[in-house]
Amino acid sequence: MASLGVNIDHIANVREARKTVEPDPVPMALLAELGGADGITVHLREDRRHIQDRDLELLRQTVRSRLNLEMAATSEMLAIALKISPDMVTLVPEKREEVTTEGGLDVVNQQSHLSEMINELKLESIPVSLFIDPLSPQIEASSKVGANWIELHTGSYAEASWQNRQLQLSRLIEATARATCLGLRVNSGHGLTYQNVEPIASIKDMEELNIGHSIISRALAVGLRQAVREMKDLIRNPRNSNSLG
């Protein structure tokens, strides 16, 4: 059964739109945990467009589930991760001009750099996940550089037309099976909603789904605690309950 990591970056987006003090993502993380979140995910971007260093420091002190820090593979971010010591680091690609993360890491062409960073984090007992597209070369390279997890980018699945969604789902199923054979643990995320999450939650060996925008959008109507509870129910009891893969 997959668990749920709730990404709270979008709460900070609202705050930073006015450069004020509210809404504060730190107490909101508590509401997410009360709603059933198995972990809290934040992306500390190099341009600090939403989550700030202060948020990360306070979340490290207050999160009682699991704190997953998404970050670029840079020396600045490595130093912050080693100082804060999150429960997990997820390395993601990052471009200043993008609205949100577009596509997965190119692990194949960054093996030396990523291997060094992963080793430094693992020496401090911080497990590492790599956010990648569901492609065999990227999965195999992720295993070679020593990652503990991969997080499969589900954007192509989420954005697919209804005619092509099954094809994209099949690719995620195959990628999960391949990664598991290589000893990698598998999470997934990006673009998952209340309407499309259940097939992903049903994939055999899928460990965790990281979801942010859809939950925060739903929370505007029903409150964050209830929005998390509703998503958690879909992940725990998908209507197509036979595991895929």
Image (cartoon, rainbow, N blue to C red):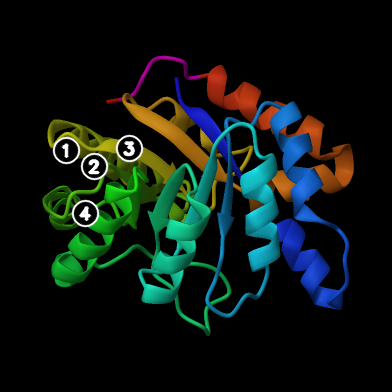
Precedes in sequence: disc 1 or disc 4:
4
| Three-letter residue code for mark 2 | Ala
Q: Residue 31, relative to residue 229: is it above or below?
A: below
Residue at image x 21%, y 70%?
A: 113
Precedes in sequence: disc 4 or disc 3:
4
* Callout 2 crowding tier (Cα within 10 Å): few <14, some 14–19, many ≥20: many
* Callout 4 crowding tier (Cα within 10 Å): few <14, some 14–19, many ≥20: some
Decide whether residue 183 is among the magenta residues: no
Secondary structure state at the residue bearing disc 3:
strand
Give the alpha-carbon distance from disc 1 to disc 3, as whole Å: 10 Å
| Three-letter residue code for mark 3 | Val
Tell me the number on the disc at residue 186. Answer: 3
**What is the x, y in percent for residue 76?**
44, 75
Please give the residue where the numbered disc 2 appears in the rendered image: 175
Q: Residue 203, relative to residue 167: is it above or below?
A: above
Quarter occupied by the C terminus? top left
Highlighted magenta segment, given as a residue range: 240-244
**Magenta span dominant secondary structure:** loop
Please give the residue where the numbered disc 1 appears in the rendered image: 178
Q: Are marks 2 and 4 in contact (CB under 8 Å)?
A: yes
> Which residue is more in the foreground, 43 or 79?
79
Q: Is residue 237 left or right of residue 110?
A: right
Q: Is residue 138 left or right of residue 193?
A: left
* Callout 1 crowding tier (Cα within 10 Å): few <14, some 14–19, many ≥20: some
Q: Are marks 3 and 2 in contact (CB under 8 Å)?
A: yes
